Amino acid sequence: MRNPMLAMNAAQERCANLGPHRVDAHRWSVVRACAGLVLALAMLPNVCNAAASVDPRLVPDTALAIPPLHFDSNGALLISPSATSSRHDFDYLVGNWKLTNRKLKSRLTGSTEWLDFESRVEMHQILDGLGNIDKYTEQSAKPYEGVALRLFDPATRLWSIYWADGNSGHLDPPVVGSFENKVGHFFARDTYKGRNIIVVFRWDIRNPQQPIWSQAFSTDDGKTWEWNSINVSERVK
C-alpha cells in the first residue's frame, strides 16, 4: 500500500484543483475531512495487522468470570474450596516449561501498553505431593529469578501459593483458592505501590499441555479488575 500521507496530500490536491475559483472556508473544511478519512482508511490495515499479531492465548479470557468475593466482619477474605479441590491439582505442572509472557508496562494507571518476553520454569513436587516449587527465570539482559511455593492444606482443602523473587528477598502474602472445572482462582489482600488491592491468580488448565496463568488487581474489593500479566506455558522435552 502506498504511503498514507501521500494519499492524503493527493486527495487535498485533487479537491483544491477542481476549478479556477478560490476554495472558500466551508469547502476547505470538507476537503480536510475527506483527506482525514483517506488517511484513516489507509492506516486501518496496519492497525488490524497489529491487533492480529497478538497471540490469542495471551489475551485474558473475560468470558471466564472471576468468582464473587466474600468477606468477614473485619473485611478479611472468606475462601471456600471447590467440591473437587485436590492435592493433585498441580500434578500437570511437574517438569520443565518455556513461557511466553505479556504484562502491562504500568499497572493501575490506565495503561494499554503491553511488554512481551520469554521465561523458563522448572517445577518439582515436595512433601509427598502436598506441595511443589517452581524456579522461575527470565531470559533478559538483567537476570531475574523467582520462586513459587504451593502448599495444599488437607484440612481446609485449599491451596496457598507464595511468591518470592530476587528483588524483594521475602515471600509475598499467599494467594489462596482451588480449582473448579479445570480453572483455578486464588486470592489475597495485598498492597501495590502503597495502594490496597486484592490480587487474583488464575490458572486455566483446560488445555493441560498449554496451561495459562494470569493475574489481575482490584482496588474496589472485586467490583472491577485490571488484568496486568499473563503467560502460556509449553513443555520443554
Image: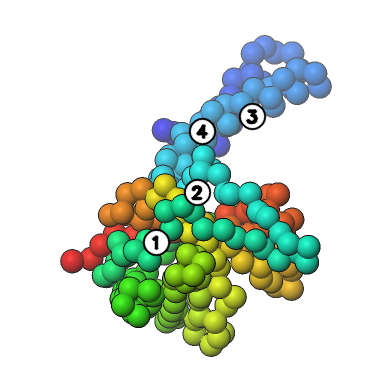
Q: Observer-nearest residue: 18 or 113?
A: 113
Secondary structure of the residue carrying tag 1 is: loop
Measuring 44% from the left and 74% from the top, which residue is drawn there? 151
Q: Give the side of residue 46 with respect to residue 18, left or right.
A: left
Dot 4 amino acid type: Leu
Dot 1 amino acid type: Ser
Q: Is residue 115 visible?
A: no
Q: Observer-nearest residue: 145 or 142?
A: 145
The label nearer to you, 2 versus 4, is 2
Which residue corresponds to mark 2?
Answer: 60
Measuring 49% from the left and 81% from the top, which residue is drawn there? 165
Q: Residue furthest right?
A: 25
Q: Give the side of residue 140 with respect to residue 106, left or right.
A: left
Q: Residue furthest bottom?
A: 169
Q: Observer-nearest residue: 7 or 227?
A: 227
Q: Is residue 170 visible?
A: yes
